[in-house]
Amino acid sequence: MAAMKASNTKRASWRYGQAAAEERPSLRACDHPGCASHGEYRAPRSRLHLNQYYWFCLDHVRAYNAAWDYYRGMSPDEIEHEVRRSTTWERQTWPLGAKVGNRRFSFTIDDPLGVFDEEAEDLRKAKARPETPEEAAMKLLGLDGVLTLAILKARYKELVKRHHPDANNGDKDAEEKFKQINQAYTTLLASLSA
């Protein structure tokens, strides 16, 4: 009986060793040219292909990571846009209290004891403050959010084409709107340069 038990144990351990060997992944070579080590560490191929990988040994993955620059080849405007987009996990956001569709987000607190009267008065004063020239210019050009030079120039070009007096047969209203657009553009351009 003991001999049979020993033989079953030997077979079971052999099977386990065989199964473990079959489950082991095959070792791949390091993707660095001329390296004979095993590639155990993955690294993304590029910013545009983050799910495709090189496989490197420890020394070469360290060198690759030290030289990695996600923003390489991007203009400053593209970098700014990417940073802004990734700040909100690439999801659309709205300013607090912004009107979205037919709904308006607003937050009020029922304050029967007047604990927040001072804050409420400050909020009323802030809402009643006069509009700055930059805010008025942004509103006139139909812009909101973060303003970059590229966004400003694109919007200005679009509005100038639409409201230029020559494109509207010398219409006086279009001419007045054109002057307002130029003034708003100058104001915002000066604020961006400052």
Image: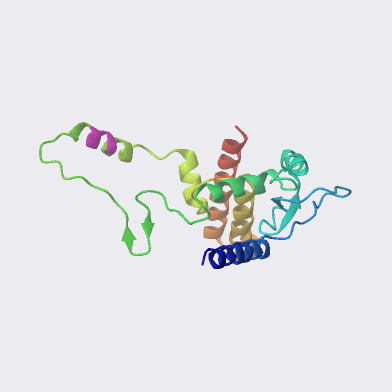
On the image, the x and y values in percent for residue 179 come to 57, 50
* Magenta region: 119-123
Picture quadrant of residue 102: bottom left
122 inside magenta stretch: yes
Hey, which residue is sitting farthest right in the picture? Answer: 34
Q: 20 or 178, which lies in front? A: 20
Q: 116 or 141, which lies in front? A: 116
Examine the rendered structure and indicate whether residue 100 appears above or below residue 122: below
On the image, the x and y values in percent for residue 121 come to 23, 35
7 inside magenta stretch: no
* Quadrant of the drawing holding the C terminus: top right
User: Residue at the spot x=48%, y=39% of the render?
Assistant: 133
Q: 131 or 85, which lies in front? A: 85
Picture quadrant of residue 18: bottom right
Q: Main secondary structure of the magenta part?
A: helix
Q: Is residue 169 visible?
A: no
On the image, the x and y values in percent for residue 154 come to 63, 54
**Image-based side of 75 in relation to 125, left or right:** right
User: Residue at the spot x=55%, y=47% of the render?
Assistant: 84
